[in-house]
Image (spheres, grey):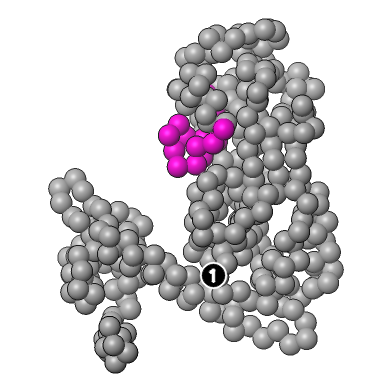
Amino acid sequence: MPDNRLERFAHNLDWNLLRTFVVLVEEGSITAAANRLLLQQPAVSMALKRLEQTVGHKLIDRRPGRFDLTEAGERLHRQCRDIFAAVVRLPNTLETAGEDVTGHVSIHSVSHAHNPAWDRQLEGFFRLHPKVTISITIETTVSVISSVERSIATMGLCDGNIPDGLAKALHIREQYALYCGRGHRLFGVKGATLHCLRGDPYVAFTADILGGQHMNAVTAVRAVGSFGQQVRAVSSNVEEVVRLIVANIGIGMLPNHLAAAGLAAGELWQLPPYDRLPTTDVFRISNPNAILNPAEAAFLKYVEDVEPLDHSAQHQ
């Protein structure tokens, strides 16, 4: 497309249509998008039609029981995500730094992603830059990744399958084992087998879904061992998963270093498998394409070499 046509296209485009399109994709239906945008359904349908006419491509395949992005729709959605990420970051980029680094750093993390080396690095950074502020939001794996992709978060701490477009560095490695509470029939029993666990109700982490997009080695053990098919309780918070297992709501996989206190107190008991225990990696992730304020740029540079912590080596 020649430059003059590109300029005319950008001038004539109603940018509100892009926002409506993004919400449509996120909600997956005209009705849900209309409710979120506080609009009538016909208005949302008309906005989609106008956008398709403007770009000259069908963007969403809408048929009974189907709501699928076309190839053009997928490409436009990726571009829209980058556009809105840039808009979200505009206030931060306009902050004046002067001689002192100022600005806000936003970290989104799964629960209990603790690494003493990370804490020391945080202490050093804020000693150097006392005018910087920070917020830490605890989320699920999927939400952390999404927040970093959309540049809502400066950095994420999470496990899961990290998209190729994000930068990542190992933060901690954890080894998991299966545990039950005192009220379980196998509590205190040595030498139990996986066969004994089939049919037992299970307590799962939110991302621990058989066949899910972030299925990891922990979930794979469930599949191979044929246990944990009946998920009775779910939480993204480690303390709550421990609490539910101790209360005998179900059996569940826990990081060994976080289950140690419960074992010592006689509240938890380790179940099979006893060897070849799975490990998961928690990464520090960031978006290389994000528009950063001075504080964020300085922070990412300062913490890039934090030494990872391998909990699995401590429990072998």
- Classify 303 as above or below 258: below
- In the image, is residue 203 part of the stretch drawn in magenta? yes
What amino acid is at disc 1? Answer: Asn
Q: For the point 57% across and 67% down, which residue is it?
A: 288
Provide the residue span drawn in magenta: 202-217
Crowding near pointer 1: few (<14 within 10 Å), some, many (20+)? some
Q: Nearer the viewer, residue 218 or 133?
A: 218
Q: Quadrant of the C terminus?
A: top right
Residue 270 x/y as whole percent: 68, 18
Q: For the point 63% across and 76% down, which residue is it?
A: 293
Residue 233 x/y as whole percent: 51, 30
* Secondary structure under the numbered disc 1 in the rendered image: loop
- Classify 103 as above or below 58: below
Residue 129 in sight from this viewpoint: yes
**Residue indicated by mark 1:** 289
- In the image, is residue 91 part of the stretch drawn in magenta? no
**Quarter location, residue 154:** bottom right
